[in-house]
Image (spheres, grey):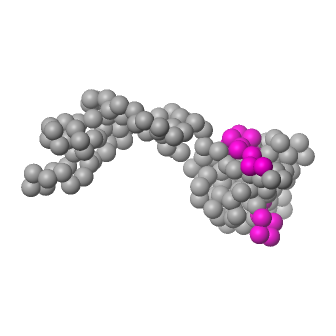
Amino acid sequence: AAGQAAHNPDWVGSTQIFTHLADEPTPINIRPVFLAGHLVGTLVELGVSDAEQLPRAEGGGNQGSPPRIVAMRDSRLVLLRHPEISFAESEGNDVWLTTDQGRLRAASGSLDKLESEQGGAGFLRVHRRYVVNIGRVREVERRFKGEMLLVMDDEQSTMVPVSRRNAPAVRRELDL
């Protein structure tokens, strides 16, 4: 974009980017910003694509590939797609993932890190020890004094506790 703008100050380009906010690419426009005749930056407009299409970058990595969470099985790294993970549980210094492949240790050392990296991808902190994949909640059990448990869709129908502090966010996410 900077190269194009240097040749033509009125140039506007467009492309698509992949974000954690949607499964589909988001169209964007890119407009150069000049100050005293010098390019000082670019303005990016999300959700708009009405300009010259920019070419795709060479070796653009894993654009379009779904994000993955890395787990460990013995000495191997296991790359998990989000739908394969039911929930993550903190146990001492380890984070354990309950997955379609069984219980695996997350390569990420903390539940906080997992939550911050995957929060926009359907994972929600429900308790100080648990982050769940909202799409894998099968049932919600309400108990005495507002206590709430999430019944997950793993083989054991694991019941994950919801803290009182996180209960409003869980209700919002599940439209309860």
Q: Is residue 65 visible?
A: yes
For image coordinates 36% across by 41% down, the residue present is 46
Q: Residue furthest right?
A: 156
Q: Is residue 134 visible?
A: no
Q: Quadrant of the N terminus?
A: top left
Residue 156 falls left or right of residue 163:
right
Residue 93: x and y in percent read 77, 69
Instruction: Label the magenta part by its dominant secondary structure.
Output: strand
Q: Position of residue 12 (x, y in %)?
A: 23, 36
Image position, residue 96 (x, y; %)? 79, 57
Q: Nearer the viewer, residue 119 or 79?
A: 79
Q: Is residue 81 magenta?
A: yes
Q: Give the left or right position of residue 99, taking residue 62 as reference.
A: right
Residue 58 among those drawn in magenta: no
Q: Give the residue at x 35% y 38%.
A: 28
Q: Is residue 40 above or below residue 112?
A: above
Q: Above or below — where is 147 with respect to 33?
A: below
Q: Is residue 70 above or below residue 162?
A: above
Q: How many marks?
A: 0
Whole-percent x and y of residue 132?
72, 52
- Residue 4 is drawn in which quadrant? top left
What residue sits 85% from the left and 46% below the top?
A: 102
Q: Residue at x 74, y 49 (%)?
A: 77
Q: Which residue, as the protein is rendered here, is positioned at the far left?
A: 36
Most distant residue in the bottom direction: 92
Boundaries of the magenta span = 76-94
